[in-house]
């Protein structure tokens, strides 16, 4: 494994979106499109390999799509779905010790953890590729990959786009990860719409200023509907609020309703990392601009491509 750079090589470990370059994304998306068209062709790419999924926080999409991706590539999977309670973390074992041990059993580790710096710590202890499947409220880099792939499928580009991120931008990690990624492309503009107590994190705001990237914070959904190419709605992260009154103050502020659709561009798309609570009315689901279920499905194909690229680089092509 190569080291000592600011970020790891994304063909070795995945910890955050800033690692990905446009050329890496081009390679990933080309392969994802091939896999999506004909997944059976890739059914032996990871045969003989073992993927460990360690999830210290709940998940439906990320864990199951990684496990489906690994198995569809011919790998086997070992898993601990509630590692906070059922792994030896509950006895006080550190992330580093757990990863050192699991590295001895598996060829890949996919980890979701509640601490913001968990994947960086895990990489420092891992002798096999480590993939961050969500780290606290900081990052969810493979979600950004599938989000970007969905945008690319719909627009044929990742530049010259206006994205409006809506919801809990302080405790959520998916909008940040996607914005870090899209900020690598020319002429993208960002709107951020969040409850007063859930506004954009200081780190992302500084990143956008430092790179002279156009962004505006708005207080009403209606202010962004007609301009957005991508309306990226997120959930208010109830489980991350220390105070229930703060949650009550944030919830239900921005709900996308059927009546909003007429104000949006015809070619705009509506995305959501899911799970959804009430922030998009189910009446919106049948609109052709609603892409969130296709987005979730893309997660498996993007993760198949990612596992194959890392496997080919670290263990050699079949
Ligand atoms: N989008 C996402 O990370 O979903 P899960 O929490 O279900 O994995």
Image (tube, rainbow, N blue to C red):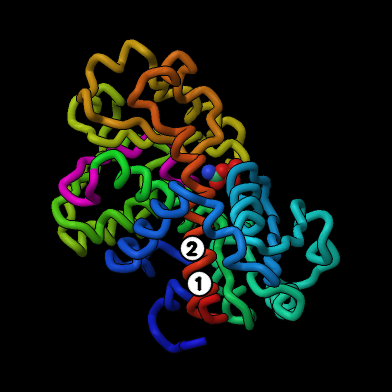
Please report the bounds of the magenta region as a residue range: 156-172
Residue that badge 1 annotates = 310
Secondary structure under badge 2?
Answer: helix
Image coordinates for residue 222, horizontal then vertical, percent: 26, 22
Label 1, residues with CA under 10 Å away: few <14, some 14-19, many ≥20: many
Picture quadrant of residue 255: top left
Image coordinates for residue 224, horizontal then vertical, percent: 23, 29
Which SS type dominates the magenta stretch? loop
| Residue at the image position 46 percent from the left and 17 percent from the top | 281
* Residue 179 is at least partly visible in this image: yes
Residue 7 image label: none
Image coordinates for residue 11, horizontal then vertical, percent: 45, 74
Measured along the vertical axis of the image, is residue 279 above or below residue 311? Answer: above
Q: Is residue 193 left or right of residue 249?
A: left
Measured along the vertical axis of the image, is residue 223 above or below residue 235? Answer: above
Between residue 168 and residue 9, name the one nearer to us.
9
Picture quadrant of residue 290: top left
Label 2, residues with CA under 10 Å away: few <14, some 14-19, many ≥20: many
The quarter of the picture showing ligand 1: top right
* Disc 1 to disc 2: CB gap under 8 Å: yes
Residue that badge 2 annotates = 306
Classify mark 2 as within 8 Å of ligand 1 or not, answering yes or no: no
């Amino acid at each position: 494994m190569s080291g000592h750079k600011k970020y790891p090589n994304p063909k070795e470990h995945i910890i955050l979106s800033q690692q990905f370059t446009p050329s890496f994304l081009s390679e990933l998306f080309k392969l994802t499109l091939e896999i999506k068209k004909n997944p059976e062709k890739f059914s032996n790419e990871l045969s003989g390999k073992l993927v460990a999924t360690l999830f210290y926080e709940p998940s439906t999409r990320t864990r199951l799509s990684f496990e489906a991706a690994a198995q569809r590539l011919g790998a086997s999977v070992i898993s601990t779905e509630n590692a906070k309670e059922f792994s030896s973390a509950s006895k006080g074992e550190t992330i580093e010790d757990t990863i050192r041990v699991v590295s001895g059993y598996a060829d890949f580790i996919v980890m979701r953890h509640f601490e913001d710096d968990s994947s960086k710590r895990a990489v420092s202890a891992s002798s096999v590729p480590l993939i961050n499947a969500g780290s606290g409220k900081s990052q969810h880099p493979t979600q950004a990959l599938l989000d970007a792939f969905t945008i690319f499928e719909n627009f044929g580009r990742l530049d010259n786009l206006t994205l409006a991120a809506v919801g809990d931008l302080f405790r959520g990690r998916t909008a940040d990860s996607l914005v870090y990624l899209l900020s690598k492309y020319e002429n993208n503009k960002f709107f951020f719409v969040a409850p007063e107590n859930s506004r954009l994190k200081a780190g992302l705001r500084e990143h956008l200023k430092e790179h002279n990237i156009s962004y505006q914070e708005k207080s009403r959904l209606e202010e962004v509907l007609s301009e957005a190419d991508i309306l990226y709605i997120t959930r208010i992260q109830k489980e991350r609020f220390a105070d229930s009154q703060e949650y009550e103050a944030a919830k239900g502020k921005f709900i996308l309703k059927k009546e909003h659709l007429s104000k949006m561009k015809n070619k705009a798309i509506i995305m959501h990392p899911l799970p959804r609570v009430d922030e998009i009315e189910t009446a919106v689901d049948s609109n052709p601009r609603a892409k969130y279920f296709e987005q979730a499905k893309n997660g498996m194909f993007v993760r198949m491509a990612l596992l194959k690229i890392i496997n080919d680089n670290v263990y050699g092509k079949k």
